[in-house]
């Protein structure tokens, strides 16, 4: 026989031997993959103790600065409400009027007054943030009165900006 004729036969026998070797039972016994008893128990994390509460000493100088800034915030808020009412009336009158008309200019002037009052709130918020940054830069913990004042200033600024946006949309809608 020719060796080239035997090649396919040898190849087929080698392939059959390779396939049949996978059918042979293992001679060793392998461990079970089922969960062990210890793995079935619930894992309980150790209870962590609450960190000790840090007492933040009073800071009279910071309290005085906060009082000044909060006074400016209160003045801005108190002035904003009547200015918003005037701007709202002017915006209603300016609806449908041409850009540059007398009623449009009056509404824009009222909006500028509102924006000026909002900028006072923004300045106060910036001052509060500067105090917080300075305090953090020296490694001091957050001062509760400063954190609360900053939250109030941010809420006031957000409310004022929302009112301005609504009125500006009324003016430019037509």
Image (cartoon, rainbow, N blue to C red):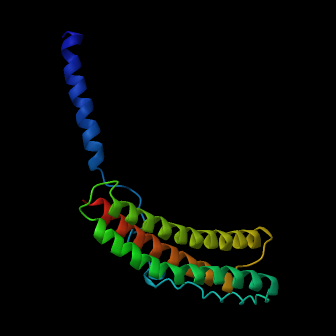
Q: Which of 54 and 19 is in front in this view?
A: 54
Q: At 78% across and 72% down in the image, what residue appears?
A: 139
Percent from the top left, x then y, of residue 155? 51, 78
Q: Which of 85 and 146 is in front in this view?
A: 85
Number of marks drawn: 0
Q: At 60% across and 88% down in the image, what residue appears?
A: 47
Quadrant of res 123: bottom right
Left or right of 100, for residue 8 = left
Q: Is residue 143 visible?
A: no
Q: Quadrant of the N terminus?
A: top left
Percent from the top left, x then y, of residue 39? 46, 78
Percent from the top left, x then y, of residue 153? 57, 78
Q: At 30% across and 50% down in the image, what residue appears?
A: 24
Residue extending furthest toward the front = 102
Up/down of 96 relative to 114, above or below: above
Residue extending furthest toward the top = 2
Percent from the top left, x then y, of residue 3? 24, 11
Quadrant of res 73: bottom right
Up/down of 159 relative to 5, above or below: below
Left or right of 60, for residue 124 = left
Q: At 77% across and 67% down in the image, what residue appears?
A: 137
Quadrant of res 59: bottom right
Q: Can residue 168 be seen in this view?
A: yes
Left or right of 166, for residue 76 = right
Q: Quadrant of the C terminus?
A: bottom left
């Amino acid at each position: 026989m020719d060796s080239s004729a035997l090649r396919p036969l040898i190849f087929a026998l080698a392939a059959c031997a390779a396939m049949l070797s996978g059918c042979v039972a293992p001679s060793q016994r392998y461990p079970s993959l089922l969960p062990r008893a210890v793995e079935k128990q619930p894992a309980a994390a150790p209870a962590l103790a609450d960190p000790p509460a840090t007492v933040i000493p009073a800071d009279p100088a910071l309290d005085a600065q906060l009082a000044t800034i909060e006074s400016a915030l209160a003045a801005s808020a108190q002035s904003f409400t009547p200015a918003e009412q005037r701007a709202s009336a002017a915006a209603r009158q300016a609806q449908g009027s041409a850009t540059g008309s007398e009623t449009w200019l009056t509404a824009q002037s009222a909006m500028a007054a509102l924006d000026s009052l909002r900028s006072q709130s923004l300045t106060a918020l910036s001052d509060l943030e500067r105090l917080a940054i300075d305090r953090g830069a020296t490694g001091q913990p957050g001062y509760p009165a400063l954190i609360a004042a900053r939250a109030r200033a941010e809420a006031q600024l957000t409310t004022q900006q929302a009112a301005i946006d609504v009125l500006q949309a009324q003016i430019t809608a037509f």
